[in-house]
């Protein structure tokens, strides 16, 4: 599923992001292998992703299946941090890791307008940030907020 609409506000975007994650779970079950930990998952998914900004004045949220198979741009894996977060969350949700807690992080230049989002998982008390816009797992960009 693909949601393409003019940007309204962060709450609207987060509601649709949650919907896209839910829609992505069946695809993730059939697409994502089981991994021993989030780092292995990151290293498997990251080479399949290609960053591209959203179209001007548009918030494009692609489900995991759309991102990888029927991409808006016509290039499998092409999207931005929102799309990568959806894929990351769905991929982690189908892993058979015990004691996992998934989260998202919003960051930006001020607290009212986040410009970046990434997913993460806490597994057995260890934090694994999964920012697929970075080259390596666990790396976090510095933002004021």
Image: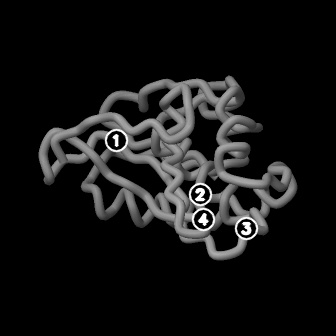
Of the residues tagged 2 and 4, which is closer to the observer?
Answer: 4
Can you identify the residue that label 4 sits on? 123
- Cα distance, mark 2 to mark 4? 13 Å
Is disc 1 surrounded by few (<14), some (14 to 19) or many (20+) residues within 10 Å?
Answer: some
Q: Give the mark nearest the N terminus, 4 or 1.
A: 1
| Disc 4 to disc 1, C-alpha distance | 23 Å
Q: Secondary structure at mark 4?
A: strand
Residue 20 falls in image quadrant: bottom right
The outermost residue toward the bottom is 99
Rendered view: 49 above or below 84? above
Q: Percent x, y for residue 77?
A: 66, 31
Q: What residue is shown at x 55% (from left), y 60% (from top)?
A: 121
Whether label 2 touches label 4, CB < 8 Å: no
Residue 89's tag is 2
Please tell me how many numbered marks the rendered image carries. Answer: 4
Please give the residue where the numbered disc 1 appears in the rendered image: 116
Spatial CA span between label 1 and label 2: 15 Å
Labels 3 and 2: the sequence-earlier one: 2
Q: Earlier in the sequence, mark 1 or mark 3?
A: 3
Marks 3/2: CA–CA distance: 13 Å
> Does 113 appear above or below 21?
above
Q: Which mark is residue 75?
A: none
Neighbor class of circle 3 (other Cα within 10 Å; few <14, some 14-19, many 20+) is some
The reply to whether the C-beta atoms of the residues labelled 4 and 3 are less than 8 Å apart is yes
């Amino acid at each position: 599923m693909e949601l393409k609409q003019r940007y309204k506000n962060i709450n609207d975007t987060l509601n649709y992001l949650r919907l896209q994650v839910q829609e992505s779970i069946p695809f993730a079950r059939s697409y994502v292998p089981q991994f021993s930990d989030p780092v292995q998952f990151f290293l498997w998914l990251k080479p399949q992703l290609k960053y591209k900004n959203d179209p001007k004045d548009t918030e494009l949220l692609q489900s995991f299946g759309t991102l990888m198979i029927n991409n808006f741009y016509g290039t499998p894996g092409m999207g931005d941090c929102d799309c990568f977060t959806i894929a990351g969350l769905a991929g982690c949700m189908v892993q058979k890791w015990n004691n996992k807690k998934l989260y998202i992080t919003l960051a930006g230049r001020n607290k009212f307008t986040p410009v970046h989002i990434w997913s993460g998982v806490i597994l057995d008390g260890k934090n694994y940030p999964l920012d697929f816009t970075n080259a390596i797992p666990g790396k976090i960009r510095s933002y004021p907020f």
